Image (cartoon, rainbow, N blue to C red):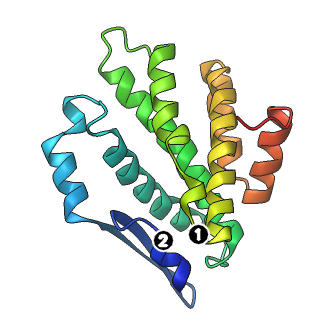
Amino acid sequence: MLAGKSALELSELARTFLRRAGDQLYVGIYYSRWLIEQLEQHDPRAGLGDRNIRSLITFVEELNHALHAALQFKRGVREIASEGFARNLELQAQVDTYLVLLLFVAFFRKTQRVSATDRRWLRFHLFVRQCPEAFRDANLRGRYLETSQLAASYTRYLDSLNGMRRLDEIRRFHSLDYGAKRHRILALTSGGMN
């Protein structure tokens, strides 16, 4: 998705590659051997914990980038090299990854209910543990800082909704471009981020 110096700052554990050729989008996902080995050694299907949560987050986010890039392209979005496109993919991936991980956690609970402690643990690993300030490139730093704060606020809002309202909201949110998503989150959360 990125080329040049700033791409060197991105994780080498996994990447999603997008290339447009005419009216076609080509998508590739790279997962490092180390990431796959970690997921095999600490299989998330056997339970989630501090030993495998970061690897699972990385795996799900890259898959999500590929899926949503293809969906956006199918809807007619062709500016795949734009910052808005990249931020949209990142924000959507963080929101979706939180929701996927909630399902994973619920699966391992006898009651299939996710506790407040579970949610705090997921939030820590998804939103708090990130270090956008570590990027030297100001654009990358801004992208990851803003999308992480927006995703944390939005998922907190989603957690406050009942099942049917949550589903309607997720569907509505998914169809928006980055600017509209950002505006919606700020409006729904009264402008407060985190």
Closest to the observer, 34 or 90? 34
The residue located at (56%, 64%) in the rendering is 135
* Residue 194 x, y percent position in the rendering: 70, 34
Three-letter amino acid code of the residue under disc 2: Glu
The residue located at (65%, 49%) in the rendering is 174
* Residue 156 x, y percent position in the rendering: 65, 28
> Pointer 1 and pointer 2: residues touching (CB < 8 Å)?
yes
SS state under label 2: helix
SS state under label 1: loop
* Image vertical order of residue 113 relative to residue 16, above or below: above
Q: Is residue 38 left or right of residue 105?
A: left
Q: Is residue 13 left or right of residue 135?
A: left
Three-letter amino acid code of the residue under disc 1: Arg
* Residue 102 x, y percent position in the rendering: 45, 29
The residue located at (61%, 76%) in the rendering is 80
Q: Earlier in the sequence, mark 1 or mark 2?
A: 2
The residue located at (68%, 25%) in the rendering is 165
Q: Which mark is residue 87?
A: none
Q: Which residue is mark 2?
A: 9
Q: Tell me the mark number nearer the camera, choosing from 1 and 2.
A: 1
> For the view shown, which residue lies furthest in the bottom direction?
22
* Residue 25 x, y percent position in the rendering: 50, 79
Disc 1/disc 2 C-alpha distance (Å):
8 Å
> For the view shown, which residue lies furthest in the left direction?
41
Q: Give the quadrant of residue 77.
A: bottom right
**Badge 2 density bin: few <14, some 14–19, many ≥20, Cα 10 Å:** few
Q: Which mark is residue 136?
A: 1
* Image vertical order of residue 111 relative to residue 9, above or below: above
* Image vertical order of residue 6 relative to residue 49, above or below: below
